[in-house]
Amino acid sequence: MANEHPRFQRYMTEHMTQLRAPGEWRGRVKDRLRHRYARHLPVDLNAPILEIGPGFGEFMELLAVDLGYRNVHGIDLSPEVAEYCNRLLPGSVTVVEDTATYLQAHRGQFSTVAMFHVIEHVSKPQIIPLLSAIRASLLPGGVLLLETPNMANPFLGLTFRYADFTHEVGYTETSIHYVLQTAGFRQISIFEATLPANHWARLVQRVGQQAVKGLIQLIYAIYGYRTSRLYRVVSPELCVAAR
């Protein structure tokens, strides 16, 4: 994933801040990430963890401040993102010119690599080489945590896909499994992007989401698709843990 043109140089100010302010929903985002991925994190608080494309730094803050991990680092193509995250967690993020090259220079060094809403920005020819480089950078038993918009969701999938000009590829459960398997991952868990039910409003929201999921699966069934095999995950985002 090379920085071949300047589309990511001002990505934070020209796109990310159009969606929300840097501090907006920070606690909510961290709760969501913790709910979805905490069970896949290493037990050892000294385990080396890398995040590719940390955005506003919520996941790194969750790891380093809230959960106590002591070896958390991030890389990004955008100097703006690195500057913001380094104000939040000094020295935490490095600007790189090419993500795959950085990973190839760090083979077998990370217990966890996280990449949330990044893979959709990668062009098709670069996807499998990047995932292969991530796999090679993991320690034995290491895990890639990945999240991306879900094209199998008929209500929000296309909105998320085309809301950002820098998005290159959209994924469903089957296509994300294919590219990960092709890159050499064998234990691939793909699951719903659920919300923590830690408040009555969230509980109501979750019930509503389950109702919508049933409707989506019914729509696929009406059109003759076997949702039990093809589209079990129909939430607006796909969540992945691949080893």
Image (cartoon, rainbow, N blue to C red):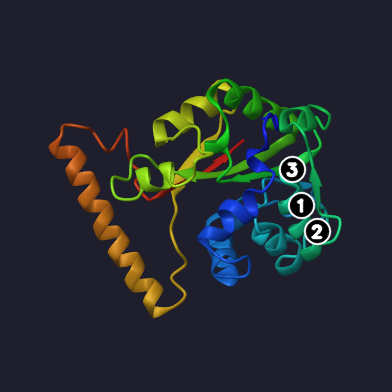
Q: How many marks?
A: 3
Q: Residue at x 37, y 50 (%)?
A: 235
Q: Quadrant of residue 101?
A: top right
Q: Residue at x 65, y 42 (%)?
A: 8
Q: CA distance from mark 1 to mark 2?
A: 6 Å
| Crowding near the residue tagged with mark 1, few <14, some 14–19, many ≥20 C-alpha atoms within 10 Å | many
Identified by mark 1, the residue type is: Ala
Helix, strand or loop under label 3 = strand
- Residue wearing tag 1: 82
Give the residue at the far bottom of this rendering: 200
Q: Residue at x 33, y 40 (%)?
A: 152
Q: Tell me whether the residue at label 1 lies in contact with that at label 2, contact meaning CB atoms closer than 8 angstroms.
A: yes
Q: Nearer the viewer, residue 78 or 135?
A: 78
Q: Quadrant of residue 203?
A: bottom left
Q: Nearer the viewer, residue 164 or 85?
A: 164
Q: CA distance from mark 3 to mark 2?
A: 22 Å
